[in-house]
Image: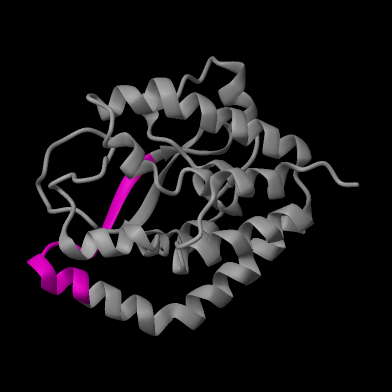
Amino acid sequence: MRRAFDLMTALMLLLLSFPFLIVVALAVRLQDGGPVLFRQERIGRHGQPFQLWKFRSMRTGGLGTAITAGGDKRVTPLGRLLRRYKLDELPQLWNVLRGDMSLIGPRPEVPCFVDAADPVWKAVHSVRPGITDLATLVYRDEERILAAFPDPERGYREAILPVKLALNLQYLKQRSAVRDLKLLAMTIRYSLVPSGFDPDRIKEALLAEPR
């Protein structure tokens, strides 16, 4: 049933947003003449790699770390806007249709951050990765947080990623259709209107035990 919901919802969202997707694609192309889409290898269900798609938000040819912190000069002006409202993630609806991803599930990581032998990663990889999850929502201001670290990649690996994995496991243990719908609604709400964002309130709402 979850897969059927993913397929119907992703297809509906792609059809409804198609004119907007065309506008964004043209804007990305006109900005610097580079490719519209960016693809990157991520690790998915059962540890299988796949190609994740996004609207390109960085300048082409820029070298750097796998982590993007606030103030990263690789990010284009349009890219900053797309990333603020999470609009760069919309092409992943295609990943959902392909079966690489689900609407809701642990965000897939790049291979350099994954320890395939770790039982925690094995548990996280037991389900399809998602466009959004509790950890992604809680850390929607991740780039701003990373900007405070002298080494953002190390800060992500040592301080943020362990917390995100713990949140993933906690959510998977309590997962239900109702919680998934609530998480999806909160993701849309805070993507379009970031004001009033409170990560503690989100955790309380999505992890509270039913009475």
Residue at image position (16%, 70%) is: 29
Q: Is residue 33 magenta?
A: yes
Write the start and end of the magenta stretch as one range.
Answer: 27-41
**Where does the image place residue 144, in percent across and percent down from the top left?**
32, 43
**Where does the image place residue 171, in percent across and percent down from the top left?**
69, 39
Residue at image position (54%, 41%) is: 135
Regarding residue 33, the answer to whether it shows in the image is no
Regarding residue 78, the answer to whether it shows in the image is yes
Of the pair 173 and 207, the residue shown nearer to us: 207
Q: Is residue 131 magenta?
A: no
Q: Against 163, is 115 above or below?
A: above
Please state if 110 lies on the left or on the right of 105 as rendered.
Answer: left
**Where does the image place residue 118, in percent across and percent down from the top left?**
55, 16
Total tally of numbered discs in the picture: 0
Q: Against 138, is 158 above or below?
A: above
Please state if 125 lies on the left or on the right of 40 as rendered.
Answer: right
Answer with the quarter of the image where residue 166 lies.
top right
Please state if 193 lies on the left or on the right of 38 as rendered.
Answer: right
Residue at image position (47%, 19%) is: 115
> Which residue reaches farthest top?
117
Residue at image position (55%, 59%) is: 187
Q: Against 106, is 9 above or below?
A: below
> Which residue reaches farthest right?
211
> Which residue reaches farthest front?
196
**Where does the image place residue 150, in percent across and percent down from the top left?**
22, 25
Colour setting: one colour
Answer with the quarter of the image where residue 34 lies.
bottom left
Q: Quadrant of the N terminus?
A: bottom right
Of the pair 130 and 143, the residue shown nearer to us: 143
